[in-house]
Image (cartoon, helix red, strand yellow):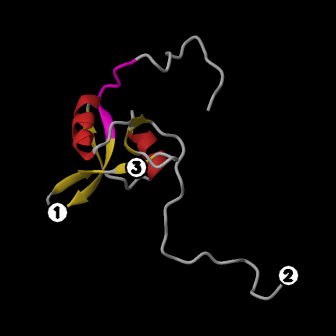
Amino acid sequence: MCLFLYDDEPDPDEQVPAGLLHVPVHRQATGFVLRTFRTPLGERTAVAFTGRARLAATLGAGQASIRLAEPALRALASPLGIGRLVLDPALSAPAVTTEPVRSEAPVGTL
């Protein structure tokens, strides 16, 4: 978290229209499904990005997305019980894999 404010940055409480957002989705046979996330404290959240490059930098170039305005995204997330929207998250955990974690040192050595 940045503790310094700059003159050209809006106050975090100010609501500024973001325009069309890139919203991560899952592709399914019947269409697209909103991809949801969790905050570090476990709260479900919707995530959106202001540019395709920001989405690719955080979730990978292969992540499917659709373009939605903020009110449309909130309308999709609300029936799922999601009231929080995170815009342009910069940090994410590495992808979960099914492969076991392997140590560099052979077993039994110090």
Residue under label 2: 110
Check disc 2 and report its element: helix, strand or loop: loop
Q: Quadrant of residue 51?
A: top left
Q: Residues within 10 Å of mark 3 (few under 14, many from 20)?
A: some
Please provide percent x and percent y for residue 3: 65, 24
Residue depicted at x 34% and y 21% = 17
At label 3, the amino acid type is Phe
Q: What crowding class fits label 1: few (fewer than 14 Cα within 10 Å), some (14-19), or many (20 or more)?
A: few
Q: CA distance from mark 2 to mark 1?
A: 52 Å
Label whose residue precedes the other's in the sequence (2 or 1): 1
Residue for badge 1: 29
Q: Measured along the vertical axis of the image, is residue 89 above or below residue 107?
A: above
Q: Nearer the viewer, mark 1 or mark 3?
A: 3
Magenta-span inclusion, residue 21 = yes
Which comes sooner in the sequence, label 1 or label 3?
A: 1
Q: Residue at coordinates 25% horizontally, 29% vertically from top-left?
A: 71
* Part of the protein shown in magenta: 15-22
Element carrying mark 1: loop
The structure residue drawn at horizontal position 75% and vertical position 85%, both measured from the top left corner, is: 106
> Which amino acid type is marked by label 2?
Leu
Residue appearing at x 38%, y 56% in the figure: 62
Tag in front: 2 or 1: 2
Residue designated by label 3? 37
Mark 2 surroundings within 10 Å by alpha-carbon count, few (fewer than 14), some (14 through 19), many (20 or more): few
Q: Position of residue 102 (x, y in %)?
A: 64, 78
In this picture, is 10 found above or below 100?
Answer: above
Q: CA distance from mark 2 to mark 3?
A: 40 Å
Seen from this angle, which residue lies furthest bottom?
A: 108
